[in-house]
Image: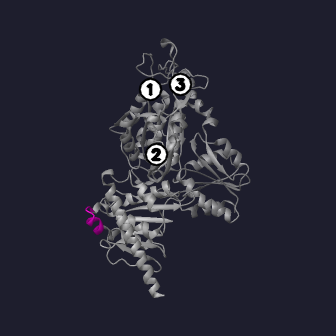
Amino acid sequence: MKKTKADPKGVLTGAHYLDGDYAIAEGGLAAGCRFFAGYPITPSTETAERFVERIPYVGGVFIQMEDELASITALIGAAWAGKKAMTVTSGPGFSLMMENLGLACMMEVPLVIANVQRGGPSTGLPTYVGQQDMMQAKWGSHGDYEIIALSPDSPQECFDLTVDAFNLSETYRVPVLLMTDECVGHMYEKVVIPPADEIEVVERKWYDGPKDEYLPYKPDEDLVPFMIKAGDGYRFHTTGLTHDERGYPVINAECQNVCVPHLVEKIRQNADKIIRFEEEETDGADVVVVSYGITSRVAIPAVQKAREVGIKVGTLRLITVWPFPEKRIKELAGKIKAFVVPEINYGQVVYEVERCAYGQAPAIHVPHCGGWVHDPEDIFKAIKGAVK
Amino acid sequence: MDIRFSGFGGQGIIKCGLITGKALSLFDGKNATLTQSIGPEARGSACSSQLVISSDRVLYPYIVAPEVLVCMSQESYERYEPDLRDGGLLLVDEDLVRNAKPRGKTKMYSIPATRIAEELGNKIVMNLVMLGFFTAITEVVSTGAMKKALPGLVPSRSLELNEEAFDRGYEFGREALAGSEKSEEALV
């Protein structure tokens, strides 16, 4: 893994008034993304539109695909050809991408998918907010694997975290999911894009050894194998089947026992380096509100109100949702009375909090089935109820 | 402060929010979060954009009872006026909203924005006339910031026309304010 500075061609340095969707496109371009394949879907289409508008000036490829299955598959091809690649979608398209998300994990392909979540299930609420795909992000494809998922709370963070998503993706050769939502995606706020030389980007770990010795799935010390560019003269094989270090299918339990743990462990063993969260006033707190994305902003007025009536409340905002900050939740659970977990779904991340609390503190869910954000009053009531 | 711009799709309602939000965020040192009501029925029916303005970070992104409501169609007036906060400001295009009247402590100011835009040669700039009027009446954003926000949000070939439309609306607003102060003095 080599860190460099962003290519100034893709960086629109300055202060802008952008919505989250546009900021995702700018983040991708700043991170060095030069390939985008997608299929339009509300409320994510603006990201694709922005990319299309900008790519002729930056240099790169945009393809409107026939559907989301084709979109993610094109990304896998582009990544093997050496490009940083991304797509954007929402619930129904995200569902269609699940099979080949697994393929990307199995092939260890770096790519970024932004999911601008809307209310589901099915076609649901195309133009309104939801946070209902959080567990799908973790478990949506079949088999055992690990992915990384980030959750921005503002257009500024849509930019920042898209850059981070590419960097993590390149570092660990894994798909990274930017789990935003319609509210943040369609919300305009000030977005500051730094000069290119202040944006750190990770360059893929290229193999430069003898051509006939390249092994696409031989883990390096950090567990991440080297990559090559298809077409550069290296012989390589890649497959969705269980494979050995050469990438050749080996259909037996022994190989499965090397291949699958590798996919999982390269993320789990690096979890401390990957996980990011923001904590406030958790020292001495009786209640900790765990939230992410737009809900973490909406929760603050509730937290402030609870403090005004004398309740000791802390907050933990997940920036990385997957892998989950299991250790920190466990530590906090031993010191507090309860977690309060508002999210725009009928119970997803709350179960992860509950699991990580190991029974030391309850995790109280504040549900919302989508279409709007929480009324802070409902979160306040849950906080109040938690200390009774 | 919460502001709603409303009218029908195609009038530049979202653009009103974008220009004001950009002006406040980039040039007036405020935090301004813009959300928009978008639906499959956007063009031709009620449409609105909402701004939440604060000197601190905006937390709750939506507006509940706005302090300022700008109405550029009858439908939007009927739909959104009941939500206007008591003591709030109501700004209407007087040719497009009939029978508009203040309620309780709300204050109403009206302008023939579309007609002024037509006089300028293109009714498409009626939203800029309204924005000039809005800037004069509400004083929540500076004229300098509004002018600076225009490039990139209006076509460069019609930048001057848009500026002119803004100025006309602004002057109309200043006069309306002076007029209403006089009538208040007369009452005293």
Q: What residue type is labelled 1?
A: Gly
Q: Which chain carries label 1?
A: A
> Circle 2 is placed at which residue position?
A23
- Label for residue A375? none
Q: Give the range drawn in magenta.
A: B114-122
Which of B146/A131 is in front? B146
The quadrant in which residue A306 appears is bottom right
Query: What secondary structure is marked by label 2?
Result: helix
The residue carrying mark 1 is A82
Q: Quadrant of the C terminus of chain A?
A: bottom right
Q: Is residue B115 magenta?
A: yes
In percent of the image, x 34 and y 67: which residue is there?
Answer: B72
Query: Tag on residue A205?
Result: 3
Residue A385 placement (x, y as % from top left): 65, 62
Residue B152 against residue A221 in the figure, above or below: below
In the rendered image, the quadrant that contains the N terminus of chain A is top right
The stretch drawn in magenta includes residue A355:
no
Q: In front of the other: label 3 or label 2?
A: 2
Crowd band around label 3 with a 10 angstrom C-alpha radius: few (<14), some (14–19), many (20+): some
Residue A11 in the image: state x and y as whole percent: 46, 39
Which numbered mark, 1 or 2, is in the foreground of this view? 2
Q: Earlier in the sequence, mark 3 or mark 2?
A: 2
Same-subunit check for callouts 3 and 2 = yes
Q: Mark 3 lies on which chain?
A: A
Q: Please, what is the three-letter code of the amino acid marked with disc 2?
A: Ala
Is any atom of residue B163 visible in this view? yes
Q: Is mark 1 on a helix, strand or loop?
A: loop
Q: Earlier in the sequence, mark 1 or mark 2?
A: 2
Determine the CA span between mark 3 and mark 2: 27 Å
Q: Where is residue A175 in the image (x, y as percent from the top left)?
A: 49, 34
